Amino acid sequence: MVVNILRAKHIFKVVFVGDPAVGKTSLVARHVRSSFRENYIPSLGANITSNDYLIDNYAVTLLIWDIAGQEIFSNVREKYYAGAKAAFVVYDVTRPETLNGTKIWVDDLKKFVSLDIPLILVGNKIDLERKISRKDGEAFANKLNAQFIETSARTGDNVPEAFREIAETLINKLVKHV
Ligand code: G3D
Ligand code: MG
């Protein structure tokens, strides 16, 4: 019985937010290329992919929602965010305005989801010449009460780690209550 519970699948919706062209779609594409099931839902303007993890015997599936267009329109925003259990909040380390933009995305997200969902602030494009230091990114993550990671969707640097971090955080929160 205990074994069955441990093996039950835990499915979490996670959403990507962030300014246009920060690399949201590239991060998802880089991560799910090998094992992917993709679903474009035109009425939501979202791409949904899924990825499976085994974390300490817990089977975890992330349903990863990515805004398909550059804009998220008000009439679909609620559906895009609804039921999200975590969010990737992405900025581009070469464009400082995108880091400030994350605050607006997080404020918007929190109008629709529980205030305490795990957030991971992702500084993407570290293969390029950066304008935002790691330290400044970390400080911003602290203010947002978010985890922090820097990635490159181009080279793949830290991309699996970002997804795994979210999967681990979610399973810890749900199952282990930590
Ligand atoms: P979005 O989904 O957030 O709007 P995209 O962003 O994933 O569409 O990426 C926007 C552009 O940034 C793309 O360039 C993409 O190739 C590039 N990009 C994304 N991530 C990285 C990265 O880590 N490093 C580098 N060097 N470029 C990246 P194009 O030219 O196709 O528009
Ligand atoms: Mg995109």
Image (tube, rainbow, N blue to C red):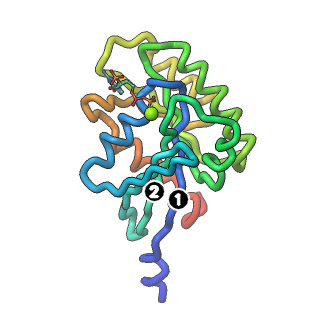
The number of callouts visible is: 2
Residue drawn at (60%, 62%), measured in percent from left and top? Answer: 177
Tag 2–tag 1 contact (CB < 8 Å): yes
> Is residue 15 found left or right of 78 in the rendered image?
left
Q: Is residue 80 shown left or right of residue 59?
A: right
Percent x, y of residue 45? 53, 43
Which residue is at the front of the view, 178 or 30? 30
Q: Position of residue 51 (x, y in %)?
A: 38, 57
Quadrant of residue 76 in the image?
A: top right
Q: Residues within 10 Å of mark 2 (few under 14, many from 20)?
A: many
Sequence-wise, the earlier of marks 2 and 1 is: 1
Q: Is residue 95 above or below residue 73?
A: above
Residue drawn at (45%, 84%), measured in percent from left and top?
4
- Residue located beneath label 1 in the image: 12
Question: Which three-letter amino acid code belongs to the residue tagged 2?
Answer: Leu
- For the point 46% across and 76% down, the residue is 8
Query: CA gap, disc 2 to disc 1?
Result: 5 Å
Residue 62 has which mark? 2
Q: Residues within 10 Å of mark 1 (few under 14, many from 20)?
A: many
The relative height of residue 58 versus residue 12 in the rendered view (above or below) is: below
Give the side of residue 27 with respect to residue 18, left or right.
left
Asked if residue 101 is positioned above or below residue 66 in the image, the reply reads: above
Residue located at (64% from left, 26% from top): 103
Q: Position of residue 19 (x, y in %)?
A: 54, 25
Q: Secondary structure at mark 2?
A: strand
Residue type beneath disc 1: Phe
